[in-house]
Image: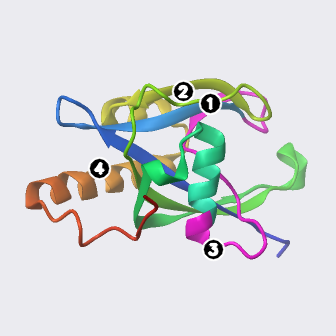
Amino acid sequence: MSWVIQSAGGIVYYIHTDGHPRYLLMKRYAISKRIEWVAPKGKIEPGESTEQAAIREISEEAGIPQNKMRLWVQLGITHLRSDEQSRGQLNKDTTYFLVEYLGDPNLLAIEDGGWLTGMYKWATLADVLALLYYQDIRELVRKAHHIITNRRKNHDVKSQFIKSLD
């Protein structure tokens, strides 16, 4: 087995004024040259924990100050494997966390450059499920939605979060 890139990111959400969560999606250029909607993520740097990498990458990609995020639970790990003949070898595991955005959803600063197009949206669950290409990420968003709605019903907010950086 070849070397596997380790990445971390988040399913970032806030609660809209209608009481329902909205999820952050960003447009990026995929290796395949198509443009796709994704959740923020990136490579784990040496000496960095998975949690630290997730918060840093979300902050860098979405322009969210680290103190405006609350890291809740680990949602899961996605595994991307490809062969050299189709589009170049890419082996990547990405750990995703549920991340609550504590700031103004209109104040993101996603820049156009690198892999990102500079476009983003706060999407409903239905929008996310229609826009995300990868089934495993859609499943993580479904899991996130279930956690958020159950937590809100039970009002058990303080007991489940991993790290608040404020």
Residue annotated with mark 1 = 110
Residue nearest the observer in this picture, 166 or 20: 166
Give neighbour class at mark 2: few <14, some 14-19, many 20+ (Cα, 10 Å). many
Q: Position of residue 30 (x, y in %)?
A: 73, 36
Residue annotated with mark 4 = 145
Residue annotated with mark 2 = 120
The three-letter amino acid code for the residue at tag 4 is His
Q: Does residue 121 appear to the left or right of 46 in the view shown?
A: left
Q: For the residues marked 2 and 3, what is the alpha-carbon distance in whole angstroms?
A: 27 Å
Q: Of the residues under marks 3 and 4, which one precedes in the sequence?
A: 3
Q: For the residues marked 4 and 2, what is the alpha-carbon distance in whole angstroms?
A: 19 Å
Residue annotated with mark 3 = 49
Q: For the residues marked 1 and 3, what is the alpha-carbon distance in whole angstroms?
A: 24 Å
Foreground: disc 3 or disc 4: 3
The three-letter amino acid code for the residue at tag 1 is Ile
State if disc 1 and disc 2 touch (CB < 8 Å): yes
State if disc 4 and disc 1 touch (CB < 8 Å): no
SS class, disc 4? helix
Residue nearest the observer in this picture, 158 or 18: 158
SS class, disc 3? loop
The three-letter amino acid code for the residue at tag 2 is Tyr
Q: Position of residue 151 (x, y in %)?
A: 19, 59
Q: Of the residues under marks 2 and 1, which one precedes in the sequence?
A: 1
Q: For the magenta stretch, what is the residue range? A: 30-52
The quadrant of the rendering that contains the N terminus is: bottom right
The three-letter amino acid code for the residue at tag 3 is Ser
Q: Of the residues under marks 4 and 2, which one precedes in the sequence?
A: 2
Residue nearest the observer in this picture, 62 or 127: 62
Q: How is the image coloured?
A: rainbow
